[in-house]
Image (tube, rainbow, N blue to C red):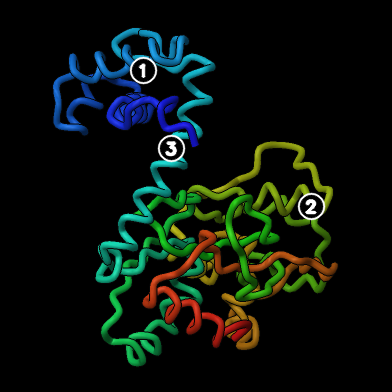
Amino acid sequence: MDWRSIPSLSSLRAFCAVASSNSLSAAGRELNVTHAAVSQQVRGLEKHLGVALIQREGRGVVLTPEGTVLFEGLKSGFESIQEAVHKVSGADDARPINITTTPSFAVGWLMPRISDFRAKHPDIDLMINPSPYVVPFEPGGVDLAIRYGAGNWPGLEAEMLVHSNYVVVGATCLVGDQETFAPEDLIRFPWLQEFGTNEIALWLERQGVVAPSRLNISHLPGYMILDGVKKGHGITAMAKTFIQSEIEDGVIRVLFEDLRQSTNGYHIVTRPGVQRPAMKAFVKWLRSLKDS
């Protein structure tokens, strides 16, 4: 490697901070230096490379095409550096395992089982972040995600945990005693959907159904969906594994189930690389519960 051709680390770090915040002032606060010092570092980097990296826009800055290319490379590089430093220094050893998943999965599957992990590993701290949004993996942040899909997320490792088709369900008090429903029959009912998700639209699209008008959809936190369905406030599409007991007890009815073979399900998703001991223990525990 030609080390003499590489700009100074301080100028690269200053540029990354500016690119992340789109602000010289914010970058200065993050680096604990003045915005003038940050500006000087970025100008020096631009001079070294012979290209403009940022340009002013309003009260902030935006990246030029060259700046965008450089930032994408530097961001992953600095993340790798930070991760390596944490591993060598042991800074990650005592950090809780940061887990992100949807509220529905957290309430319907993970929390009823988590006491088993706590009993087996009382020395490992967990931080569970129920969110309908896809939380990005960053050093010092999310360690593990449990996501629904086909398991093909670029740059990440995915392993099937719970295989489950989506079913449309509703209470008898709402849908009546009609024996069978076609997908197009279901658009006349009110729907309940978890905040931040679009499962209903995706489900209708997979069935080839085009709603003639705007659907009547109420958006609720994930933990309220099942209770709302049981009370007849609406129908919903969800993973069958969450409601198997309610179906068997006759509390709610399956109105439609797509029985076509599907590779979709809830996956254990992690970043590639060596896992710290606490993470290995948690992943091993999850694997012991596959399709349970």
Which residue position is annotated with label 1?
Answer: 45
Q: Is residue 89 above or below residue 211?
A: below
The image position of residue 17, as x and y in percent, is: 31, 30
223 and 99: which is toward the camera: 99
Classify 10 Å Cα crowding around label 1: few (below 14), some (14-19), many (20 and above).
many
Q: Is residue 171 left or right of residue 218?
A: right
Q: Residue 172: which quarter of the image?
A: bottom right
Question: Which residue is painted at 53% across and 25% down in the image?
Answer: 69
Q: Residue 267: which quarter of the image?
A: bottom right
Q: Is mark 3 on a helix, strand or loop?
A: helix
Q: Is residue 277 above or below residue 274?
A: below
The amino acid beneath tag 1 is Leu
Q: Residue 58 carries which label?
A: none
The reply to whether residue 225 is in sight is no
The amino acid beneath tag 3 is Lys
Which residue position is annotated with label 3?
Answer: 75
Marked residue nearer the N-terminal end (3 or 1): 1
Marked residue nearer the N-terminal end (1 or 2): 1
For discs 3 and 1, the disc positioned in front in the rendered view:
1
Q: Which mark is residue 206?
A: 2
Q: Distance between the residues labelled 3 and 2?
A: 37 Å
Q: Is residue 241 above or below residue 221?
A: below
Question: Which residue is painted at 39% across and 42% down in the image?
Answer: 78
Question: Which residue is painted at 62% across and 75% down in the image?
Answer: 162
For discs 3 and 2, the disc positioned in front in the rendered view:
3
The image position of residue 67, as x and y in percent, is: 47, 20
Q: Is residue 201 above or below residue 103?
A: above
**So how many labels did they put on this image?**
3
The image position of residue 63, as x and y in percent, is: 44, 17
97 and 4: which is toward the camera: 4
The amino acid beneath tag 2 is Arg
